[in-house]
Every structure is written in structure tokens, then in C-alpha cells.
Amino acid sequence: MKKDLDRLMEERGLDAAVLSGSIEGNPNMVYMLSGAHVSGGTVIKKRGEEPVFLHSPIERDEAKASGLELINTIKYDFMSILREKGDPLEAQIEFHRRVYAELGVQGRVGYYGTSDQGRAHVFLSKLDQELPDIQVQGEFDEGLFEVARATKDADEVVMIKEVARLTAEVMTATMDFVRGHRVEDETLMTDDGTPLTIGMVHKHIGRLLAERRMEDPGGVIFAIARDAGVPHSRGTPEDPLRLGQTIIYDLFPRKANGYHFDCTRTFCLGYAPPEVEKTYQEVKQCVDTVIDAVKVGLEARSLQQLTCEFFEDLGHATVGSDSKVEEGYVHSIGHGLGLAVHEEPWFTDAPSNDRLLEPGHVFTVEPGLYYPDSGGYGVRIEDVVWIDEQGEVHNLTDVPYQLVLEMS
């Protein structure tokens, strides 16, 4: 949470943090600006002080929505600096020199945000060299703002719940749309006599999202048969929908530049083959087992270990025993969820992952079993859980578990 930033900065030995770049594709900036509709800018946070937002003069009104102390960059007249220096890099160094002098930024300064990697390297190296009062700091693993974002406050959870509600609406409406088609020779048909295809369903999902002012920057997963057995296959647009084949529907939308939700359901139309029904029940039991194990203070990686043990006891191969496995259980049990669809906490079973579950964590639980080549199917079920301030665990997902969708 934002209230943890000073503590996290102290733990990292940071005197200040500088976050910059466009707001698009930069969830840390969205987080610090509280959804203000600006194109970008720079947030400077000194330890023990409130953050300051340096914004463009043409966005001075929109910047007010950030709730931060504002500094209009026109004050420093960058164009005059550029004319004086004649070199864009030298001008940027001088601009930062003036800003840091006025705000009293010095000591160990962490840098965050979005920039071309080469450009960032050149700029930060030059800045470290030219400004003797600061020492440029970077972080490779758990970034300051990512760790702060990992725990959500009550207002954030309210926004996530709203996206959860809309996501459930879209998923239910999608299933109703599919079930509304007639069947010929076990293939769903449209009114014009052509098969209903994966591509047609994707377009319908897009309309449902747009009606609710939602967006899916990562793309919807709606995949059938073998494609359902490859976890991140979006589905082949030309594939027809047929009875008895597994369909994985994974929807992870967000409000514009806002919070995501993430839900997966697996279903078959009309009937399910016995091996799919058995696999489905095993995956559902795993979901329940993992959610039951969630508690404050638990090592996040232990949920991945639990999932691997659960599936291996049932005879399935897992990444716990073979990191190269491509059939069976082949991925992580979940991920944090918020302004990015994948964020802290992570559940990777690695010695370096010492993350403990905390109040405020919101994350997915999404075990799956995949047999694209040996069985031509895959099964995944995904719910989102939240640990509240009292340590109680809540399932935020309100989409029924239903393997077989009856056709009229």
C-alpha cells in the first residue's frame, strides 16, 4: 500500500524515489497518480515526505486529480535549457539538476518507470556522474512500487470487485451466446448456415466488454480442443465450436487504465468425455485445496509446492519434478492481481522467493492440467482471492463451476 512506501524506502536505503514515463503501460505511474488522466510525467518521493508530481503545462488541470502536490514543468523552461546546452542529454541533466536543487533531492535515489533500456542507461549513468549529491540506485528483482502495490487497501478492493462483477457478466453472457446456437452433426451453426467459430466468439466478447467500458489489453483466451491444452493459446479463429470438446475461457479485462480481474472457466458443450470429466474434478479439488491453505504468514511458494504434490499424487507430471514438462501441470499456481494483470505476489517455487502472504494481497489461484498432444484437451479453473485486514480469505469470483453446458 502507499502508506508503506516510507518503510520500504528505508529498508532499501533510499532517500528518494523518482518515477517517470508515460502513464500508458506504466502501472506504477497509474498507481501514484490515482488514475489522473494525464499522458505522463515525473513523481518524486522523498522519504518521510509527500510525493510531488511534475507535469506538463498542457495537463495542469488533469494533474489536479492526482491529489499530489503539483509542479508545472514550465517553471523550469526546458526549451531555454535546450537552446543553451544544444544537446538533449546535457539539457536533461541540467533540468534535473535544477529540479533536485529546489526539492532538496540528494543521497541514494532510486529510479523507476518506463524508458528505452539503452536511453535509460545513458541518462542515468550521466546523471550519476554529473550530480555529486546523488547516487543513482536501481533494483533488479522486487521494485519499490511493485512491492507497495502488492497489498491493496479498501478502496482498491472496491474497484477490483466492480471489475469482478462486470467480468462475471461478460462470461455469463458469452456462454448464453454460445448456447443460443443450433447444432448440426455436433457443430454449432449460425443463422446463415456456417459454423460458429472461435473468431466469432472473440468478436462477441469484444462487444460485451465495450458495452461495459472495459478493455482487454492482453487479449482474451477462448480456445477449444488441442488449443485448450496450451495454456496461453488464444484459440485459432477458424476453429468451429463442437460438442464434447474442452473450451478454456480466460478473461482478464480492466477498466481503462485501471484495475484488472482474472477468471478462467473450462466447459464442454453438450457433454464431456469421461477423461475430461475426471480431469476437471481433479482440478476443481485442487482449487479448493489451495484456497483452503491460504493464510497470513504462509510462504507464497508453498502454494506452488502444494499444487505439484497434489497433482503428482494423482499421477500427473508437474513442473515441480521436471521444469521442462509440457503436459500435465506446467505453470505457476497464480499471481498477484491489480493495476497489472500479473504482479506481486509471485508464487514461483524458487529459493529466492521468500514472499509471505499478507493482509491486502489479491491473487489468482489457477491450477490446470494440459494434454494437448496425448489427449487433445486442457482444463484450467481460476479464481481470485483477497486476504482482508483481519486475515480472512475471500473468494472474489462469482462465476459458476459448470463443466457441461447443455445445448437446446
Image: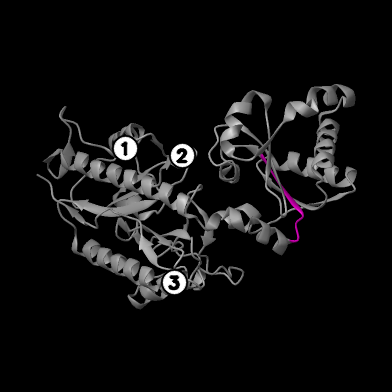
Please give left or right for residue 226 compared with residue 100 in the image.
left
Q: Quadrant of the C terminus?
A: top left
Residue 167: horizontal and vertical position, in percent? 33, 45
Q: How many marks?
A: 3
Q: Nearer the viewer, residue 358 or 282?
A: 358
Q: Give the residue displayed 52% in from the left and 58% down from the top.
A: 151
Secondary structure beneath dot 1 equals: helix
Residue at image point 47% right, 53% down? 337
The answer to whether the residues at label 2 and label 3 have Cβ atoms under 8 Å apart is no
Residue 192 belongs to the span the image colors magenta: no
Q: Which residue is mark 2?
A: 217
Looking at marks 3 and 1 on the same chain, the residue that comes earlier in the sequence is marked by 1
Mark 3 is surrounded, within 10 Å at the Cα level, by few (under 14), some (14 to 19) or many (20 or more) other residues, namely some
Using residue 42 as the reference point, say whether residue 106 is left or right of it. right
Q: Secondary structure at mark 2?
A: loop
Report how far apart the C-alphas of labels 3 and 1 lie in the structure. Answer: 35 Å
Magenta highlight range: 13-20
| Residue 5 higher or lower than 67, as above or below | below
Q: Which residue is mark 1?
A: 205
Q: Residue furthest bottom?
A: 313
Identity, as a three-letter code, of the amino acid under mark 3: Lys
Amino acid type for the residue under numbered disc 1: Ile
Q: In the displayed structure, would residue 81 be above or below residue 199?
A: above
To which residue does mark 3 refer? 295
**Cα distance, mark 2 to mark 3?**
31 Å
Pick whichever of labels 2 and 3 is earlier in the sequence. 2
Q: Is residue 60 visible?
A: yes
